[in-house]
Structures are given as structure tokens and as C-alpha cells.
Image: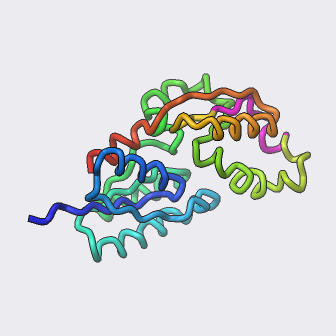
Amino acid sequence: MTPRRVLVIACGALAREIGAITKGCGLDHIDLACLPASLHNTPDRIPAAVQAAIAIGRKTHTHIFVAYADCGTGGALDRVLHDEGIERLAGPHCYAFYSGVEQFLAAGDADMRSFFLTDFLARQFETLVIRPLGLDRHPELRDAYFGQYEALVYLAQTDDAALNVAATAAASRLGLRYERRFVGYGDLALAVGKQ
């Protein structure tokens, strides 16, 4: 009997982490299809992009799992997945599932004025935060975007000194207090491991 192949359709921001989880846990029955992480700049496009990936994936896989949280779609992704009969990661965004959704939601007010980074965002801070917001050309916009924040919280998936340096530099660039929390892969590992 041929083992079941599972397709995980994921945000490109999770590719490295899902690869580490599947390799580390010997989950060689999982295939990964990633959509561009830049879709987060236009979250209204995420549901249609995921639905198109599902249509393609169904040609080769009988089981599909979506590695996206709601990610700013306002429930639109859940409506698509309900119609398709497919599950996704629990939670409103990756900060929640990396921290553990229950723990993240419990922190609520304490983290209300925090800007979060993951390993991916620490690596791509210039490309995905500074340049798209125009802060490289107009640093005076810093207060308009980040004036309400008090801290930059780096939710570390790995214990990587270079990423810690990058996250520290990001906090300094934004003029925010720096905090590092090692969270590992959190609920992402649990969800992928069940597939």
C-alpha cells in the first residue's frame, strides 16, 4: 500500500520552518507548496491564492492542509476553506501559533503595544518592513507607523545569534525596546506533525 501523500499549502514565510519540522520529524510523506509571503501586504488576495493552489493540489493529492492563520483576511480564508473542506492552522496570525495560540491570546493587553518579528521577518526586515513602508527614503515616517509601539518582540523559532543581532538592530532602527522570546515552532510543529 502506498503511503498517503499530504500537500501542505503554506505562506512562503513558513517554508524554512516547515522544512525543518518535516525533516527533523521524518515526515517524508509531506509535500510543500508555498505562496509568496508578499501576499501579507494584500491579505484580501490570500483566499483566492490559496483556493487556486488547492485546485492545483487536488490534481495530485487527496489530502491537503493549509499552513496559514487568518492573516488579516477577516474570515474570508476560513469561508474558502470551509467550502473546500480543508483545515488550516489555528489562530489569527503566525505570532499566535508560534507562541501557542492560547498563550498569545492570554498575553493580550500586555503585548498590545508590541511589534513582533519572527525568524523570517528578522531575516527580511529591510525587504518586507523598511522598504515597503518607505522608511529607507523617508525615515521621518517612523513615528506615523511605529509611534504607538513600545517594544519590538522577537519570537525566535531558532537559537541563531545572527538573527538575534538582526532583530536587535531592527528594534534600534525603530527606536523600540527589544525583547527576545524563544518560542520554537509552537503550534506549527503540532499541526504539521499531525498530517
* Residue 188 locus on image (x, y percent): 40, 43
Q: In which quarter of the image is the N terminus?
A: bottom left
Residue at the far front: name it. 161
> Can the viewer see residue 74 in this picture?
no
The vertical placement of 127 against 52, above or below, is above
Q: Does the magenta stretch include residue 88?
A: no
* Residue 38 locus on image (x, y percent): 61, 61
Residue displayed at 82% across by 56% down: 134
Q: Does the magenta stretch include residue 147?
A: yes
> Can the viewer see residue 48 in this picture?
yes
> How does the figure colour the protein chain or chains?
rainbow
The vertical placement of 148 against 8, above or below, is above
* Residue 153 locus on image (x, y percent): 64, 32
Q: Is residue 154 left or right of 18 when viewed as pictured?
A: right
| Region in magenta | 143-153
Residue displayed at 38% across by 46% down: 21
